[in-house]
Image (cartoon, grey):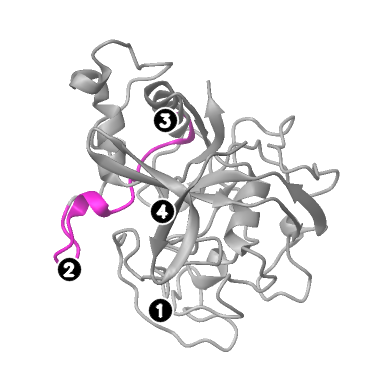
Amino acid sequence: MLKTLPIKRQSKRFRGYREYIDKVPLEMVLIPNGTFTMGAPESEEGSSSRERPQHNVTISAFLMGRYPVTQDQWRAVAQAERSSIASRTDLKVNLDLEIDPSYFKEPYEGIDRWQRPVENVNWYEAVEFCERLSKLTGKNYRLPSEAEWEYACRAGTTTPFHFGETITTDLANYQGTDNKEMKWSGSYGEGLKGKYRQQTTPVGYFDVVNSFGLSDMHGNVWEWCTDEWHDNYENAPTDGKPWLNGDDSRSPLRGGSWFNNPDFCRSAYRYFDVRRDIHDFNIGFRIVCSGGSE
């Protein structure tokens, strides 16, 4: 059973918990059991064969980070071996972790830079972070499966974005201007063009949450999933577990980023052309917890 406590945010109440890593808060939200249709129909603007065939997936409850992992949270875990909270244990599992890997190191509109999402971390480093956090807390932290990520992002919706048919730069951080070189449009559907901030924004900056209580699911930074890459959903699992036995040099990235056009930010979009060992200033991650003590 998942033990949860109420969290109050933006006049809504969500189930979950908050704990502290060396005084840095980590907020987790309960994602309930459910069944959803994964992928996009051919009628959805910008969709591709990588997002089909659509198929029903049944998800067991889990907890997910309300935000992408922040620079502050990363630092707290990466340097924990040097602090009193880890004085009795060796946290390193497989890799050394750079304490401050992010490209963006300045405040944003007066907001502390440590509230920006961490980026420039590869898949292996994100997994190492989860394993160290698990050792620190006694809980089972990990990267989400691709099915868990999409289920959590959609939060019961079937539209391209959890807030509707289109997206604006008042709701999310992405490239809202045309990019002629890349042949990207700054608008999606009937939506308007907007800003191109050219950098990450602090988590929660837009004060937008989906009905599960999650923020920053569209744009800001790409988020690693634990699955191995498959080119489409033929024979995909229907139980929400990670899909393995594919290309283990790549994992799906989800959610879009500050650098990408709005089409990439759709709930169903799967970014494929990135190896697990890459470092990039538009790639971060979000964690999940299966509950229970180890």
Q: Residues within 10 Å of mark 2 (few under 14, many from 20)?
A: few
- Mark 1 vs mark 2, foreground winner is 2
Residue 147 drawn at (x, y percent):
68, 48
Which corner quadrant holds the N terminus?
top right
- Mark 2 vs mark 4, foreground winner is 4
* Residue ID at (73%, 58%): 51
User: Quick check: marks 1 and 4 in contact, CB under 8 Å?
Assistant: no
User: Quick check: marks 3 and 4 in contact, CB under 8 Å?
Assistant: no
Type of amino acid under label 3: Glu
Give the alpha-carbon distance from disc 3 to disc 2, as whole Å. 29 Å
- Mark 3 vs mark 4, foreground winner is 4
Q: Residues within 10 Å of mark 1 (few under 14, many from 20)?
A: many
Residue 145 drawn at (x, y percent):
63, 41
- Mark 3 vs mark 2, foreground winner is 2
Looking at the rendering, which quadrant does residue 112 occupy? bottom left
SS class, disc 1: loop
* Residue ID at (30%, 44%): 25
Mark 4, residue position: 67
Mark 1, residue position: 177
Give the alpha-carbon distance from disc 1 to disc 2, as whole Å. 21 Å
Visible residue check, residue 149 = yes
Mark 2, residue position: 109
User: Quick check: marks 2 and 4 in contact, CB under 8 Å?
Assistant: no
